[in-house]
Amino acid sequence: MKRSNGMQTALATLVLLAANVCTQAQGEQATKANGRPAEIKQATASLGEGNSATESAVRYTYEFAQPEFYVRHIVVEHDGAGRGKVSFERKADRETLTDPLELSPTALGRITALWNALRFLESNTNYQSSKQFPHLGTMRLAMRGGGRERIAEFNWTKDPDASALVNEYRRIVDQALFVFDIALARQNQPLETPKILKRLDTLLARGALSDPQQLIPLLGDIQTDERLPLIARNHAGRLLKKLNK
């Protein structure tokens, strides 16, 4: 019996030693496994901070001017994160009107890709075509970042990337003007809202908006605004169905 008890004690001791070794090894593996994500997370956070600083430092500007147009002067300014403002002057206005701007990730991706395709700061390309069309208005593209700045002016261009970039900014302006006009009408002239929503319908059909999905919360609010004519609320509901498809 004594010999049997001794063997049992030895076996128990070996089992405990093996368990401790396994536990220690598992602990080390867990520390490594948990440590790597933490390191990656810290590196990603540092990278994110760097990107934010870079995005804030870069400034993009689009400007359009044609004194004879109803909207005679437009300026769109934003940083690398898509935050900025839209300023415009209309013939009926005595002062410049300004609204905040926040581009959607989708729209910002398209615009950034076009700026990159132009290699704008590194290039000295003249985007003006040989033909002049001053009656269509003058456009200016400007970019500032990394201690450099460049402005390019033209009234017509055959450069596909410059033309596409200008069209993107036109979509931004058309969407911003709708948001401004509908807000003003809701506050001061509710009977004008059906006409403004009809204009939005046309812009949607033409694909002339920067990102229609951004308008879904606004249209939802219009649909339930009992201060507005029923025709406007119903129209907003139909537009919502289109956007939610």
Image (cartoon, rainbow, N blue to C red):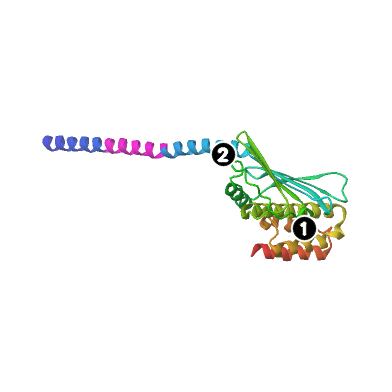
- Residue 152's place in the image compared with 220, above or below, is above
Q: Amino acid at mark 1?
A: Ile
Q: Residue at x 15, y 36 (%)?
A: 5
Give residue 82's position: percent from left, percent from top: 65, 45
Q: Amino acid at mark 2?
A: Asn
Name the residue furthest front: 130
Q: Is residue 60 visible?
A: no
Q: Callout 2: few (<14), some (14-19), or many (20+) C-alpha neighbours within 10 Å?
A: some
Of the pair 1 and 48, the residue shown nearer to us: 48
In the image, which is nearer the foreground, mark 2 or mark 1? 2
Query: Of helix, strand and loop, which one carries label 2?
Result: helix
Find out whether residue 30 is within the magenta segment.
Answer: yes
- Label 2 belongs to which residue? 51
Name the spot of residue 148 as percent of width and height, x first: 63, 35
Q: Residues within 10 Å of mark 1 (few under 14, many from 20)?
A: many
Task: Name the residue that disc number 1 marks.
Answer: 222
For the point 48% across and 36% down, which residue is it?
Answer: 43
On screen, residue 53 above or below 171: above
Spot occupied by residue 214 in the image (x, y as percentages of width and height): 68, 54
Give the magenta range.
19-35
Measuring from the top left, give residue 189's x and y in whole percent: 87, 56
Of residue 195 and residue 230, the one placed in the foreground of this image is 195
Q: CA distance from mark 2 to mark 1?
A: 37 Å
Q: Earlier in the sequence, mark 2 or mark 1?
A: 2
Quadrant in which the N terminus is drawn = top left
Residue 202 in view, yes or no: yes
* 153 vs 89, nearest the viewer: 153
Q: Which quadrant does the C terminus fall into? A: bottom right
